[in-house]
Image: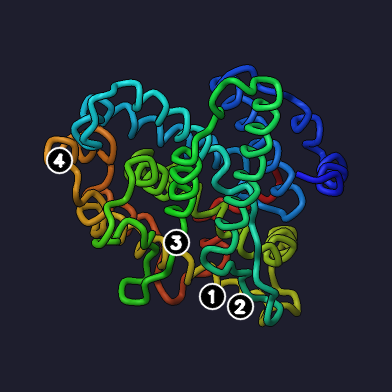
């Protein structure tokens, strides 16, 4: 790292973290996690991120931990390894990836007003990977300067696992079932590394692990994050006593967008259930059974039926009903 880069880094709010030299691997993990959470919070404040914020990073970290501990007894069998210390190191790397996987959020330029802002698949994730690995390499270098006789804190294998784990969270939209999927989980040519599979499943596995209320909350927050232009409209609509203003066309556009999102939440839930078997392919049968029964315990037909029953999808659903369903009044005043 040259002096110009150092001077740029020092201008960042996280600059004090760059000055710390870790004494060991565990302390480095703590420093990286602190760095990641600070970056996530800064990005959320700067870009009005209702969903991709500190709460989401913590939720993914928690869900990844649930998955990890469920399969830890089978770790060596899955990885075909005999060194039990590998699972401990893997857990540290999983924590780091969960905390940092959404450090950067890049949106495409809006084509027109009153439309959702969008991301290009892979752009935010690759930018996150670059930022995270730059920081880790910086810590490696500082550690090496003070401990030239010791091996680096993070090996090339560690860095590759981190890269693959965050890359696995890249999502695509499938027009066939109007759902979201992570293509790395469907790569039949190369078995996905276990760390990466855990992070990917934790990232979009909120419904299966946490249940319907958490799923609905995440849906509402994503809606607000992708459609920040609707927030003042909702506030104005709720403030109008008779809702008979001259903004009927604008409100109709808003109603159609909320209705479309409500229908998507059903499709996404169905996609999570339909895709689980494929996403667990390659794991031992007993591991799949444990994950289905103890981790993704909410992912079943009964849950889908409840979501369909609770979600307003009728073509004539009014705007007030949709705002109430998404609980937008609660979130936009926080």
Closer to the chain start, of discs 4 and 1, is 1
The residue lying at 40 percent from left, 44 percent from top is 206
Whether residue 289 appears in this view of the structure is yes
Are there few (<14), some (14-19), or many (20+) residues within 10 Å of tag 1?
A: some
Mark 2 near mark 1, Cβ–Cβ under 8 Å? Answer: yes
Are there few (<14), some (14-19), or many (20+) residues within 10 Å of tag 4?
A: few
Mark 2 near mark 3, Cβ–Cβ under 8 Å? Answer: no
Determine which residue is flagged by label 4: 284
Report, in whole angstroms, how far the alpha carbon at label 2 lies from the one at label 4: 49 Å
Closer to the chain start, of discs 4 and 3, is 3
Report, in whole angstroms, how far the alpha carbon at label 2 lies from the one at label 3: 27 Å
Mark 2 near mark 4, Cβ–Cβ under 8 Å? Answer: no
Tag 1's secondary structure? helix
Determine which residue is flagged by label 3: 171
Where does the C terminus fall, quadrant-wise? top right
* The image quarter in which residue 307 lies: bottom left
Quick one: which residue is furthest to the left in this view? Answer: 285
- Residue 214 drawn at (x, y percent): 44, 42
Question: Is label 4 or label 1 in front?
Answer: 4
Are there few (<14), some (14-19), or many (20+) residues within 10 Å of tag 2?
A: some
Determine which residue is flagged by label 1: 256
The residue lying at 61 percent from left, 44 percent from top is 132
- Residue 308 drawn at (x, y percent): 32, 59
Query: 257 or 287, which is in the foreground?
Result: 287
Query: 44 or 112, which is in the foreground?
Result: 44
Tag 4's secondary structure? loop
Q: Left or right: where does residue 180 sit relative to residue 136?
A: left
Report, in whole angstroms, how far the alpha carbon at label 4 lies from the one at label 1: 45 Å
Report, in whole angstroms, how far the alpha carbon at label 1 lies from the one at label 3: 25 Å
Question: Is label 2 or label 3 in front?
Answer: 3
Are there few (<14), some (14-19), or many (20+) residues within 10 Å of tag 3?
A: some
Determine which residue is flagged by label 2: 253
């Amino acid at each position: 790292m040259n002096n110009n880069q150092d001077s740029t880094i020092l201008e960042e709010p996280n600059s004090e973290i760059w000055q710390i030299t870790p004494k060991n691997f565990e302390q480095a993990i703590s420093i990286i996690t602190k760095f990641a959470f600070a970056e996530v919070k800064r990005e959320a404040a700067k870009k009005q991120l209702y969903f991709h914020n500190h709460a989401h990073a913590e939720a993914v970290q928690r869900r990844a931990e649930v998955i990890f501990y469920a399969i830890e007894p089978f770790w060596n069998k899955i990885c075909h390894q005999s060194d039990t210390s590998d699972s401990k190191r893997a857990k540290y790397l999983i924590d780091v990836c969960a905390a940092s996987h959404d450090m950067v959020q890049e949106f495409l330029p809006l084509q027109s007003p009153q439309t959702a802002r969008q991301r290009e698949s892979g752009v935010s994730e690759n930018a996150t990977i670059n930022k995270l690995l730059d920081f880790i390499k910086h810590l490696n270098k500082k550690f090496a300067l003070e401990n030239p006789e010791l091996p680096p804190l993070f090996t090339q294998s560690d860095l590759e696992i981190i890269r693959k784990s965050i890359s696995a969270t890249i999502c695509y939209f499938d027009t066939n079932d109007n759902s979201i999927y992570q293509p790395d989980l469907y790569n039949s040519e190369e078995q996905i590394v276990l760390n990466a599979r855990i992070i990917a499943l934790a990232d979009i596995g909120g419904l299966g692990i946490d249940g319907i209320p958490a799923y609905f909350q995440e849906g509402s927050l994503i809606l607000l994050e992708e459609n920040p232009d609707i927030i003042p409209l909702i506030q104005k609509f709720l403030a109008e006593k008779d809702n008979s203003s001259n903004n009927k066309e604008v409100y109709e556009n808003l109603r159609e967008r909320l209705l479309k999102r409500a229908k998507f939440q059903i499709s996404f839930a169905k996609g999570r259930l339909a895709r689980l078997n494929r996403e667990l392919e390659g794991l031992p049968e007993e591991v799949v059974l444990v994950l289905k029964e103890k981790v993704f315990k909410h992912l079943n037909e009964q849950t889908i039926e409840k979501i369909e029953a609770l979600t307003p999808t009728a073509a004539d659903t009014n705007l007030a009903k949709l705002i109430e369903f998404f609980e937008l009044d609660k979130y936009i005043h926080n």
